[in-house]
Image: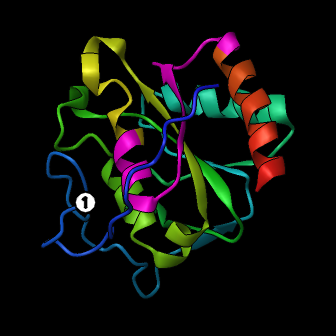
Amino acid sequence: MSVVTPVAAGPLSGSRAGFGAGGDRVARGSRSEPGERVETTGADLVYFSSVSGNTHRFATRLGEALGRPVARIPLHPGDGTLKATRPYVLVLPTYGAGNGPGAVPKQVIRFLNDPENRALIRGVVAGGNTNFGKAYGLAGDVVAAKTGVPCLYRFEVFGTQDDVEAVAEGLERFWTQQ
């Protein structure tokens, strides 16, 4: 498992600072609204997946391989919000062909704009497409840089069984060091 050295962390809030490389911005409503459904999770893996389900397939296979719980960041704003209650590793896809703006899904930005969720992140695993070239897995680099945690691994589209095994083995080592 390759580990990318994280770069200096920056805030995930405030439109003056922006959210990341290429202009990712803070999503509106970064905190739960009154009356909004909030689901808490003690999962070791928190992930976001679009309707394609690629990251969902990877994260659920990874959770099964590890025997650890996984929790999904809601896809639609009306689905409520997710609140982490213990340290976790984030699994996310890269959006927008990795061309800077929009590489990090807005739902992930919203989740990480919650200071409690941001404080509990310990690492990132990023999905992407090697057709993106240098921007392959860019969302993982952006989140790692902004949160000061390592980008632990990149996988192609929904990952292979070899990817699942490599990440599971690496995370077992990673968690024992935390």
Numbered range of the magenta stretch:
141-162
- The amino acid marked with disc number 1 is Phe
Residue at coordinates 69% horizontally, 28% vertically from top-left?
Answer: 167
- In the image, residue 156 lies in the stretch drawn in magenta: yes
Q: Quadrant of residue 98?
A: top left
| Residue 12 inside the magenta-drawn segment | no
Nearest the viewer among 74 and 18 is 18
Q: Position of residue 171 (x, y in %)?
A: 74, 38
Report the quarter where the N terminus lies. top right
In the image: residue 53, left or right of residue 133? right
- Name the residue rendered at 45%, 74% in the picture: 114
Q: Residue at x 63, y 34 (%)?
A: 59
> Label 1 crowding class (10 Å Cα cut-off): few <14, some 14-19, many 20+?
many
Depth check: give the residue in front, 49 or 113: 113
Work out whether 90 lies above or below 28. Answer: above
The answer, for residue 129, to whether it is visible in the render is yes
Residue 142, position as x, y percentages in the image? 34, 47
Q: Residue 26: x and y, percent?
A: 24, 65
Q: Is residue 95 above or below residue 97?
A: below
Give the residue pinned by disc 1: 19
Q: Which residue is rendered at x = 46% and y = 28% of the image?
A: 127
